[in-house]
Image: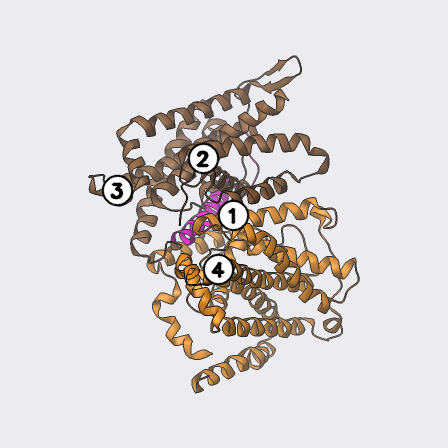
Chain colours: A orange, B brown
Amino acid sequence: MKRNQIIGLALFLFTVLVAVPLFIQASGRWDFYYTLTSVALLSIASAGVWLTFYIGRINIGQGAYALAGGYFAAIMVTKAGLSFWLALPLAGLFTAAVSVLIGLPILRLRGVYFAMVTLVLTEVARLTALALPVTNGAKGITSIPLPSGIASLSNVKLGFYYVAVALMIIVFAAMYRLVNSRVGHLCRSLQQNEELASSIGVNITYLRIIAYSISSFFGGIAGAMFVAISQSIYPSSFQVADSVNFMLNCFLGGLGFVFGPMLGTLVLYFGWDLLFQTGKYQLLVYSSLLILLMLVLPNGLLSIRLSSILGGRK
Amino acid sequence: MEQILANGLYLGAQYALIALGLTLIFALMNVLNFAHGQMYVLGGFVTYTVYAQLGLPFVAGLFASAVTLAIIGALIEYFLFRPVIRRSSREESTMLLAAGIAFFLDAVILLVFGEKQRGVPKIINGVLNWDFRLIMPYDRILIGFLAILSIVSFILFMQYSKTGRAMRALAQDRVAAQLQGVNVDRYSMIGFALGAMLAGLVGGLLVTITGVNLGMGGPTSIKAFMMVMIGGAGVISGAIAGGFILGMLESIGLSVLSQYGDITYLLIFASLMVFLSIRPQGLMGKPWG
């Protein structure tokens, strides 16, 4: 690591772990905790989508894995009586296992074909949640107990904020490590030309599955964490619009940059929140801005050289 | 059995018409039109307004839907997709734009027409009853017939008119078509307008049977994507085949599996994945790579 990278990292950690809680305490805007927790969790799921972009696939199916992870954790906690802290990684492993099964056939598809099939996957996950008896249909699973450590805290919101931010830091550190490892370089070769990569001896099927299952793992833990916070899950908790949003976060932040999803999630989520003032025109203004942004910057926020500014951050 | 087949045919004709528009846009411009379902809903609301609220004949409503959507489609192509395609370095940017347009149309529909479920009075009363083996309301038969008529005229148009030939050339090879003197920009716009028009037309047709509401857009897009994947993206015969296959599967699934609850789509999707692992390019699509 270079010196300015270390400084950037320290600055970032200080901001999210000390400065933000202090600021919230000073301003008394406790609702910001919920917003920022959501941003942290959504950026974890978006990080998964980004990783599938990294192997050259457009993934609009992250909502399916978030839903699956959420239901898995909810069922483990309510029916099997497991501790949430055990159910959280298990949910990630469960979605990763599911994604291997689903990924084997569909990862052979490319471009819009893959995008379409993953989009359908999100809808199928919702229908599955409606149909299976164990997920309790449209009524969903409600009144899930709070995770044991957090329930005893005096400030539950602050507890969740720290857990979510810690998860986010771990996920992005892992992503950074992965992308800069040998596997990461091989993944980049997939993005550019799969046949060529295959012809020089890269096991493309294996790499695709690995990347996709890591991506789904992120989706699963993000979903499970959301369930712990809202203490309930319904088939409509994650739907097509969420899957599309995960993809938008990545596009907006920029696809060439590991921390792009974090930035994109922050901008999109806060943008949406700020537009709350516009009342019933919220969606209209939001989508108009999105379209305008595409017209002005068709290559994402990254194309205004944001990477060089943020590059020194970590 | 006859009942299931008739339902499947009727559903399939509608679905094929939706998939045709989507696949046409995809073939011409390599754009995955996320907003297709929203265009369909908009078409339904236009017919609802003209036919149920203004009291004009149903045909006028259909015509208004088709024309409105064609104009919207042309404007979207000219002002949004064309500049973005020209300036973006990745083809994925158009997907983001299409998603934005889908949100935008949702917002417009919400503001203009509200979120209530809307239905229109029946266009024809009465039910065809063939010995209790086949029961089908007359309006469904008429709508199915109109849908098939639209499909046939669309195929004839693509096959024999100059515009249709130009669009087919464009879909086959954009550069070669341009070299032969096809005005690529103009025909892209016509193609997009035509695709949007088909979506509006189905919306107008189906509003008489199922009614229309804001939430129908997304699921409709997803069904259209499934059909396009079954048949192969960008292939017209594939879209028609995909539409009829999905319609038939849905009709069979809903009647055979009704006691197991809502698992029809799960099974359809599972079989779609098995099918795609054997034939990733769909039934009639061109293999790639």
Inspect the magenta stretch and tell me whether residue B99 lies in it.
Answer: yes
Q: How far apart are marks 3 and 4 (CA)?
A: 37 Å
Residue type at mark 4 is: Ile
Q: In this view, does A84 lie above or below B155?
A: below
Q: Nearer the viewer, mark 1 or mark 4?
A: 4
Dots 2 and 4 on the same chain: no
x and y percentages locating residue A5 in the rendered image? 45, 82
Q: Which span of residues is magenta-colored?
A: B94-119
Name which residue lies at 43% across and 23% down.
B149
Residue type at mark 1 is: Val
Q: Which of marks 1 and 3 is in front?
A: 1
Subunit of mark 1? A
Rate crowding at label 2 as few (under 14), some (14 to 19) or many (20 or more) other CA atoms within 10 Å.
many
Q: In this view, does B158 lie above or below A106?
A: above
Inspect the magenta stretch and tell me whether residue A99 lies in it.
Answer: no
Residue type at mark 3 is: Val
Q: How far apart are marks 2 and 4 (CA)?
A: 31 Å
Subunit of mark 3? B
Magenta stretch, main secondary structure, is helix
Q: What label sits on residue A204 in the rendered view? A: 4
Element under label 4? helix
Q: Are marks 1 and 4 in contact (CB under 8 Å)?
A: no
- Where does label 3 land, which residue? B184
Q: Nearer the viewer, mark 3 or mark 4?
A: 4
- Where does label 1 land, which residue? A117
